[in-house]
């Protein structure tokens, strides 16, 4: 649960901006989107592997 302390003089826009920033930092929205639909473990592992290959290719290109 995300708690945003609000001072007496703060307006709602500033509090909303703080809330959105805190949600982004903690990754709540990202987790919510991932959990909307079930993914088989094999699909998750495949995506992780593809991401690792992509990152490795970027690092190899950077070295050249």
Image (cartoon, grey):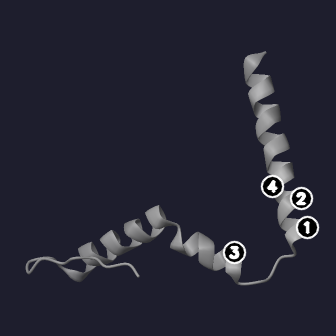
Would you name the residue on which mark 2 appears?
46
Mark 3 Cα-neighbour bin, 10 Å: few <14, some 14–19, many ≥20 = few
- Which residue is under mark 1? 42
- Could you tell which of marks 3 and 4 lies nearer the N-terminus? 3
- Residue identifier under label 4: 48
Q: 41 or 52, which lies in front?
A: 41
- Label 4 near label 2: C-beta < 8 Å? yes
Residue 11 location, quadrant: bottom left
The percent position of residue 2, horizontal first and vertical second, equals 38, 78
Residue at mark 2 to residue at mark 4: CA–CA distance:
5 Å
Q: Earlier in the sequence, mark 3 or mark 1?
A: 3
- State the SS at label 3: helix
Q: Secondary structure at mark 2?
A: helix
Q: Nearer the viewer, mark 3 or mark 1?
A: 1
Give yes or no for contact between labels 3 and 1 (Cβ–Cβ under 8 Å): no
Please state, as top left, top right, bottom left or bottom right, where the N terminus lies in the image. bottom left
**Which label's residue is closer to the chain start, 1 or 4?**
1
Q: Residue 16, position in %: x, y?
A: 32, 77
* Label 1: how many Cα within 10 Å (few below 14, some 14–19, many 20+): few
Left or right of residue 6, residue 37 in this image: right
Residue located at (80% from left, 25% from top): 60
- The residue carrying mark 3 is 34
Residue 33 quadrant: bottom right
């Amino acid at each position: 649960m995300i708690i945003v302390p609000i001072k007496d003089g703060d307006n709602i826009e500033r509090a909303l901006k703080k809330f959105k920033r805190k949600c982004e930092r903690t990754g709540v929205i990202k987790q919510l989107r991932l959990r909307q639909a079930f993914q088989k473990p094999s699909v998750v592992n495949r995506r992780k592997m593809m991401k690792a290959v992509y990152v490795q290719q970027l690092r190899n290109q950077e070295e050249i």
